[in-house]
Amino acid sequence: MSSTPAPSASIATAAFTDAVGRRRTFAIISHPDAGKTTLTEKFLLYAGAVGEAGAVKSRRVARAARSDWMKLEQERGISVSSTVLHFAYGDWRFNLLDTPGHADFSEDTYRTLCAADAAVMVLDIAKGLEPQTLKLFQVCRDRGLPIVTFVNKCDRPGLPPLGLLDEITEQIGLQPVPITWPVADGSDFAGIVDRRTDELVRYDRTAHGARKGQEVVEPWATADPQGCPPDRWDAAKEELELLDMEERVLDQDAFLGGTQTPVFFGSALQNFGVRLLLEGFAELAPPPSASPVDEPADAGARPVAAPFAGQVFKVQANMNPRHRDRMAFLRVNSGTFERGMSATLARTGRTYQLKYAHQLFAADRNTVDLAVAGDIVGLVNAADLVPGDTLYTDDAVTFPPIPTFAPEKFVSVRTTDTKRYKQFRKGLVQLDEEGVIHVLRRPEFGDQEPILAGVGQLQFEVAEHRFEHEFGCPVRMQPLQWEVARRIDASAVDALRGQFKTMVVEDSQGNHMALFASSVALDKAERDHPDIAFEPLGTGL
Ligand code: G4P
């Protein structure tokens, strides 16, 4: 990556265009346990970035052991934080955004998806579409992200693949187009047919797929069933004929436009179909392209060859407890990022020195000297950057804000150790800025008894854990009765005092909102105050 020459100003050199064209920036999404971690591991194995699979998991465990709040991850067996992995395969350069699969972290997942150009969705062949998959599908569609589907765990008995395709059509409204097709499953599994070449790829089973297995490729038409039961072999033949008859062929525009999803089958654990997926994905997924902008209003979009500009999509503190750092993840949207460059922070108009930048490989960091459009860099000690911030050089630009979610759960929080009040305050600011939780205050209470707002219970657990282990101040949280939040104008605050089952609060940016104990209370407030606009919160789902 550091060998890529920088374009001067907005001149797109051939080397720059080529470098951007080889980028694939994507996320893997799945319902927990469908196999996202295993697939990530196998991508790294095939890319030669790890010698043996198992590395990501053991890194994850090692990292969790090192970092206090990540202990929560380990205890709960869930992935709380996102990581960014950079790897090369053939001529391609992948930036893989790892999103937490837990339903409670949809806000974090959503932000991460804002930095992706495409997504791989992993389904468990035995389970089909699961609740979190449906939600993520919807998020991707809202973001206009093309989705490649990987049906995993074909080494185990699963649902009939044709039925699974119907499920995708019926429940999501996407037309699935199988690019590969499994010949039987479970212990009968005999290989995967590549519909593009009409070849059967047979696989060796290696111990837990720790190493790349041998593949034998032969024409499907003349392939021999070998150990596969004849009825299952014939069933696969019929299914493939049916797909051909239905003329299920991929239309690149329909895929990019979000009406078709190419489908690959395999087993991440056993390495079946992983190479076909990785190569197929690289060929189909779009390279970085022009990014829509908010400012200048008439610009529409910023082309990738414009001077450097990027957007912070996530901020995370204390990823490395030895350094007590704060990392801002920035997606380069245009031009070339160079370490040590200075850029303008659009929100303040001030110059910002980009001294320390890292590219992340699991828990390790490699210093980045140069990154091009589509790449993700971690800016270390980026104290004043918040999610959504735009940094640019030359032509001023502001990218649209990162979508947020309407809070649905509220708790009051206070520290149980009054001597640690300063740390408590620091924690509130930090967690709010990172977007782990939203901090609200009652205007009449000043800084006393802040309220935390979130989308799911796990968010509060993470906040509680971090208060105690990272900021050294144990806290007590008390669930509050509020259920609905609406944004209101500052001028409406007085009128709502004493309103039935309503409370007025303020967020850290000084925005006012009204919290209601129920939708009935909101209805009443709307009827009582027809002159007040109660605006829904959140721009996400
Ligand atoms: P996630 O990140 O989506 O939550 O899933 P993860 O990869 O952690 O996989 C969840 C479980 O499914 C793991 O088993 C993993 O080994 C298994 N798995 C993943 N891909 C395949 C596959 O292709 N075939 C089969 N048979 N299993 C698969 P576990 O028992 O929970 O963990 P472990 O003890 O194997 O680490």
Image: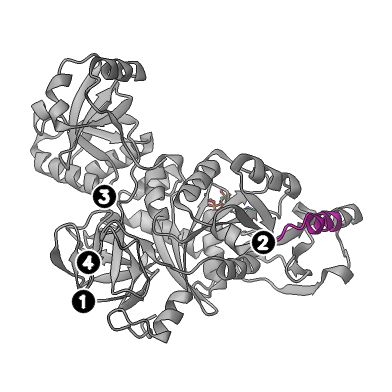
Q: Is residue 166 left or right of residue 198?
A: left
Pair 3/2: label in front = 2
Q: Is residue 270 left or right of residue 345?
A: right
Give the distance between the C-alpha atoms of the residues marked 3 and 4, in whole angstroms: 25 Å
Q: Which residue is mark 4?
A: 396
Give the distance between the C-alpha atoms of the residues marked 1 and 2, in whole angstroms: 44 Å
Residue drawn at 16 percent across, 26 percent down: 492
Q: Amino acid at mark 1?
A: Gly
Q: Is residue 520 above or below residue 44?
A: above
Pair 3/4: label in front = 4
Give the distance between the C-alpha atoms of the residues marked 1 and 3, in whole angstroms: 24 Å
Q: Which residue is mark 1?
A: 340
Q: Is residue 224 magenta?
A: no
Residue drawn at 24 percent across, 68 percent down: 392
Task: Tell which circle, 4 or 2, labels the residue nearer the N-terminal end.
Answer: 2
Q: Are marks 1 and 2 in contact (CB under 8 Å)?
A: no
Task: Tell which circle, 3 or 2, labels the residue nearer the N-terminal end.
Answer: 2
Q: Quadrant of the rendered structure where residue 336 is?
A: bottom left
Task: Tell which circle, 3 or 4, labels the residue nearer the N-terminal end.
Answer: 4
What residue span does the magenta drawing correspond to? Answer: 236-250
Q: Is residue 416 above or below residue 26?
A: above
* Residue nearest the viewer, comparing 240 with 40: 240
- Secondary structure under tag 2 reads loop
- The answer to whether mark 3 is within 8 Å of ligand 1 is no
* Residue nearest the viewer, comparing 151 with 66: 151
x, y percent for residue 254: 60, 58
> Which circle marks residue 223 in the picture?
none
- The answer to whether mark 4 is within 8 Å of ligand 1 is no
Task: Tell which circle, 1 or 2, labels the residue nearer the N-terminal end.
Answer: 2
- Secondary structure under tag 1 reads loop
Residue density around tag 3, few if under 14, some if 14–19, many if 20 or more, within 10 Å = many
